[in-house]
Image: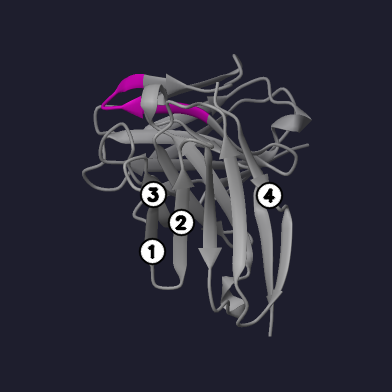
Amino acid sequence: GENVEQHPSTLSVQEGDSAVIKCTYSDSASNYFPWYKQELGKRPQLIIDIRSNVGEKKDQRIAVTLNKTAKHFSLHITETQPEDSAVYFCAAGGGTSYGKLTFGQGTILTVHP
Amino acid sequence: DSGVTQTPKHLITATGQRVTLRCSPRSGDLSVYWYQQSLDQGLQFLIQYYNGEERAKGNILERFSAQQFPDLHSELNLSSLELGDSALYFCASSPGTNQETQYFGPGTRLLVL
């Protein structure tokens, strides 16, 4: 089955800096890669996703890149703000897995004012 | 608010007992997914139903079962509960079956004593 590795597990940055979180996946059939943000005690919320026919996608301060050959994808947050502090999860799915998403272990992002 | 509702919000029970968690998907969504989130295992996919039919299965224990009813709400039944079943249980929904945004509900926090 699919296996998703996410790094780093914790990330601390100063307000205004950029943050990068990286994930690798094992199943070459996976073709859908969402990123979720989860605040303490709250539900995971989708912040951006990318499908295998696209190499990069951007939404304001957030961007995701995908390298299907290397089987890795990354989340980039620019001009970080304290409200970006949360746990971020990458996931992989699609292909033969139907709707099943396999999640990474999460990255605790802390943005210091 | 994602439009996905879950009840109850909190549940405290004893080992050996059985509980039922309920989920109502967003209006128009045909797929319902169940996930378990614990501190040591992260977000784990349990099962997916699409329009009443089981579509994908994860590492769901035999003590756990789920179903989706004609009105598309879903129930997750957990029996012979163990201490290790204590976790947050999330339901998510999407319009179809694959490569789609999954919208998460607020979760049910289960504590087994």
Q: Is residue A62 above or below residue B6?
A: below
Closer to the chain start, of discs 3 and 4, is 4
Which residue is at a point 58% across and 79% down the rendered structure image?
A81
Q: Secondary structure at mark 1?
A: strand
Q: Is residue A61 above or below residue B33?
A: below
Could one spot residue B18 in this view of the protein?
yes
**Is B53 or A75 nearer to us in this picture?**
A75
Q: Look at the image and say whether residue B84 sits in the magenta stretch.
A: no
Chain identifier of the residue bearing label 2 in the image: A
State the CA–CA distance, disc 2 to disc 3.
8 Å
Which residue is at a point 35% across and 46% down the rendered structure image?
B101
Residue where numbered disc 1 is placed? A58
Q: Look at the image and say whether residue B51 sits in the magenta stretch.
A: yes
Chain identifier of the residue bearing label 3 in the image: A
Q: Which residues are magenta?
A: B46-54
Quarter that holds the C terminus of chain B: top right
State the CA–CA distance, disc 1 to disc 3.
11 Å
Closer to the chain start, of discs 1 and 2, is 1
Chain identifier of the residue bearing label 1 in the image: A
- Say yes or no: labels 2 and 3 on the same chain: yes
Q: Secondary structure at mark 4?
A: strand
**Is B14 or B83 nearer to us in this picture?**
B83
Q: Position of residue B24 (x, y in %)?
A: 35, 42
State the CA–CA distance, disc 4 to disc 1.
21 Å
Q: Position of residue B71 (x, y in %)?
A: 25, 33
Residue where numbered disc 3 is placed? A55
- Say yes or no: labels 3 and 4 on the same chain: yes
Residue where numbered disc 4 is placed? A7
Q: Position of residue B44 (x, y in %)?
A: 59, 34
Please give left or right for residue A36 compared with residue B102 in the image: right
Residue where numbered disc 2 is placed? A64
